[in-house]
Amino acid sequence: MYVLLFAPHPRAPFPKGRGGGMVSPAVCVSSPVLERTQRVAWLFYERASHSAATTLLQMQIVINNIINKICPETKKTDKHEVIRVTGLKTGSEAWWQSKNGPEWTREKGHYRVTFWWRDPAGTQKTSPLKRVWLYITGVTDHHQNARPQSLERIPNTDVWQWQGAFTPQWRGSYCFIPSVNEDDFAAAVFHGEQPDRLALREGWRKLLPAAMADPLNPQSWRGGRGHPVSALEMPEAPVQPGWNTPATPGNAPVCFEWESVRLNNRRRVWVFTTGEDSPERPLAVLLDGQFWAESMPVWSPLTALTNAGKLPPAVYVLIDVIDMAHRNHELPCNPDFWRAVQEELLPRVNSRTPFSDRADRTVVAGQSFGGLSSLYAGLNWPERFGCVLSQSGSYWWPHRGGQQDGLLIEQLKAGDLTARGLRIVLEAGRNEPLIFRANQAIYAELHPQQPVIWRQVDGGHDALCWRGGLTQGLMTLWQPLIH
């Protein structure tokens, strides 16, 4: 990391700060672009020389433009670390204009990340807020059994901040929950060596409906639990195929209502196709279809990867869960659900959009209960579902405490089920302890029977991680079809 100090041009002195002192901005730029700094420095001089009355905000805009000229690829890859140091007064309008979400600095083997939040009610003298809870999936969430973390106000400003250490490969979502209360969590959460797990879950359950995304962060969406979240991706986080490319136009998905006789319910189903029509196109069944259709649409990444020759032309069927009650009933090892899919849904789709019925060309993919359900389908109907993509599969089910093996693990140990002939991709986050251990346990049973691809992710129970694993997993499972 090199620091570029732009000294005042003789014809354009830097503006004075509020205290009357001269402001000397600096820009930190990663070393691969050092050879271009002299040219950019003169670019800065020439722009600043046109007006000796350059304001701090104008100065920041100039610096941001310079950074974009030095390394425009940072917006696309996040592989360069760029830090802005401006000398602006903390909490000033110009200071806030310089913020674009969390900022980080490298410290030995990790990054120290600072989160910022602006209090719309102003300073502590005018604002009723007592806490701004920070919910980082895989770090401060209920899966960690960790004490809740709140940002702290910088006195006499509208600035709240929190700092934490993250690995270079980290990827995860986060949200803020402003609160006027001091006692959002029961006392048991803060007393003792570890917080009371049930009290912790209950506290977060009450707070999360009021969660908000980071207003400073343009990468925001509505998470799987329904509340807004934003993205935090460290510079060495794995590439997510298809997700960082510009929007790619393709076929429009078709949504219809599936009324199931066997299940006695009605739900939405989306059918999406890539490439030219062919009865030999492979099929992918995506569970939690409403998320991949609406919250984090998968259409453009799939189209881009197909156009690039990294995925074969295919048919994708995305199945809505209806609601959480139906999800919790139908996805965990429910034979009726999968019989209805095979007997009712897939024939209806195939009559309008032909696809291959070969098991080795058929992927079933899901996350959490959906991951459990995907492997359940492959193990019980291998003649139809030959490829399994399981992300953060809930293999503890039905024993949430983790003191007893889950159902599928027990059945594999007993020899009631076999994975022979299946192609399986297992993925889980290191920061989702219960699920990670359960995935390790089921991998230990699957691997002796059949080679299994086991991916450990530096993240938590998080759709931000799942989206890259979904496209990468499809590429892996359909690799034999790529010519």
Image (cartoon, grey):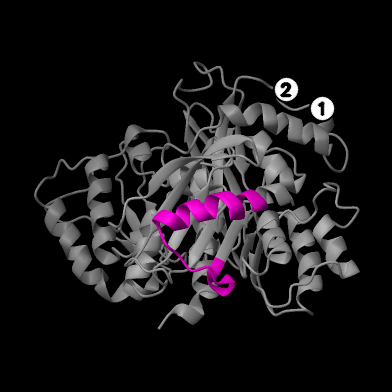
Q: SS for tag 2?
A: loop
Q: Please provide the residue range marked out in magenta.
A: 338-362
Residue 302 shown left or right of residue 206 in the figure:
left
Furthest-left residue in this view: 50
Does the CB distance between marks 1 and 2 fall below 8 Å?
Answer: yes
Residue that label 1 marks: 187
Residue that label 2 marks: 183
Quarter holding residue 65: bottom left
Q: Which residue is painted at 43% across and 79% down in the image? A: 482
Is residue 8 highlighted in magenta? Answer: no
Quarter of the image containing the C terminus?
bottom left
Residue 169 visible in the displayed image: no
Under mark 1, the amino acid is: Ala
Main SS of the magenta segment? helix
Residue 318, position in %: x, y? 50, 51
Q: Nearer the viewer, residue 296 or 30?
A: 296
